[in-house]
Image (cartoon, rainbow, N blue to C red):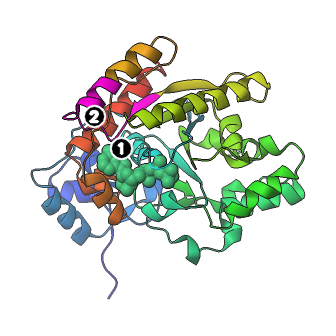
Amino acid sequence: MNEELITIKEAAARYGVSYDRLRRAAWDGRLETRGTGHARLVPPSEVERFLQAGRGKEAPELPLLRRQDGPLGRIMTVAILKGGTAKTTTTMNLGAAFAERGLRVLLIDNDHQCSLTRTLGIEPAELDPAHTLYGAMQTYMNSRKATLSDVIMSTKSGVDLVPAHIRLSRTDKELQLTSRREYVLQQLLAPVAPLYDIVLIDTMPTNNNLVFNALVAAHEVLIPLEPEPIAIEALALTLDEVQEVRDTGLNPGLRIAGVLLTQVDIRLVVHRDLMDNIRSDFGTELPVFETFIRRSPRFPESQARKQSIFQYDAAGAGATAYRALAEEISRGWQ
Ligand SMILES: Nc1ncnc2c1ncn2[C@@H]1O[C@H](COP(=O)(O)OP(=O)(O)OP(=O)(O)O)[C@@H](O)[C@H]1O
Ligand SMILES: [Mg+2]
């Protein structure tokens, strides 16, 4: 027999909880629903599971950021020319934080390692390469047709995704032979970005055409940085790259949204010193977010379970920090 499905409004009335609470949980993926938008339906058993699991560890109720006058259409690239600095973790969890506030969020996995795609519970090897960023870029390079909307997937974390494919590793060389190679991602995003409040682009830690495309396509860059001496060199290289994108006229208005200190262990003197130094040395010319993200095993744990930090530990310090980051960024939109 088919399981009963009810609307979120019906579920709220049946279980005596607020409509907003269930709607938010559906947006950020804590409550698994079927269908999209106002047509979302949920089996009562799932509502019961959610209410049971959430007892005592509910996320705070924050005001929605969604606007009446249409999507914001902002594009933010998450980049630094260094590996393992929480680019993917930040793309995923900042995206989920915005989704929790009711924003329409699109994440782009612009990395052939496909970490973001996997973390969102999608196995790239099972995807038709044509239905990934690789395929959309291929089509654009061959025919100048922008087909990104055909490759967007919805995910259980409440955000939409353009998945990556391992073949994206070939695209960098192919871009080298393409005219106007710096503009491919910008052209692909042009028809879809206005449908979202925010598009976040995850990048790889390499100075190549794909990362350059992500910088050309964006309004702003977020730079995640570990407070380690070696990361400072990578920060300088990344700032040079941003300057090159501006100076060549490819994207003269590219803003730096801010440096996000991540994987911080406040007990380490070296971390505390570097955090102070970064703020004092760069702080005047380079914005450094007030919010920083502490090192926590909850992040790798959540990723192993293919969940955002909001799905895995909604009331924990990691979720609280990414919520604060979303709030800090959104204050700049007023
Ligand atoms: N705040 C944190 N605390 C503890 N571990 C973290 C934190 N943020 C990220 N990590 C872990 O650090 C590792 C690297 O993170 P992530 O994959 O996000 O980095 P990346 O910059 O995207 O790496 P790459 O350059 O390879 O794409 C992952 O195992 C992730 O779970
Ligand atoms: Mg990554």
Residue 313: image x %, image y %?
Answer: 23, 52
Q: Residue 32's quadrant in the figure? A: bottom left
Q: Is residue 330 above or below residue 170?
A: above
The amino acid type of the residue labelled 2 equals Leu
Q: Can you tell me whether the CB of the residue at mark 1 lies under 8 Å from the nearest atom of ligand 1?
A: no
Q: Which mark sits nearer the N-terminus, 2 or 1?
A: 2
Q: Quadrant of the N terminus?
A: bottom left
Residue with the mark numbered 2: 62
The amino acid type of the residue labelled 1 equals Glu
Residue 277: image x %, image y %?
Answer: 37, 19
Which contiguous range is marked in magenta?
Answer: 259-274
Q: Secondary structure at mark 2?
A: loop
Instruction: Examine the structure image and report whether residue 153 is included in the region drawn in magenta.
Output: no
Residue with the mark numbered 1: 100
Give me the C-alpha separation between circle 2 and circle 1. Answer: 9 Å
Query: Pointer 2: residues within 10 angstroms few (<14), some, or many (20+)?
Result: few
Q: Is residue 88 above or below residue 248?
A: below
Res 65 seen here = no
Instruction: Examine the structure image and report whether residue 266 is included in the region drawn in magenta.
Output: yes
Relative to the observer, which residue lies in front, 141 or 234? Answer: 234
Relative to the observer, which residue lies in front, 209 or 227? Answer: 227
Q: Secondary structure at mark 1?
A: helix
Residue 76: image x %, image y %?
Answer: 56, 36
Disc 2 and disc 1 in contact, CB within 8 angstroms:
yes
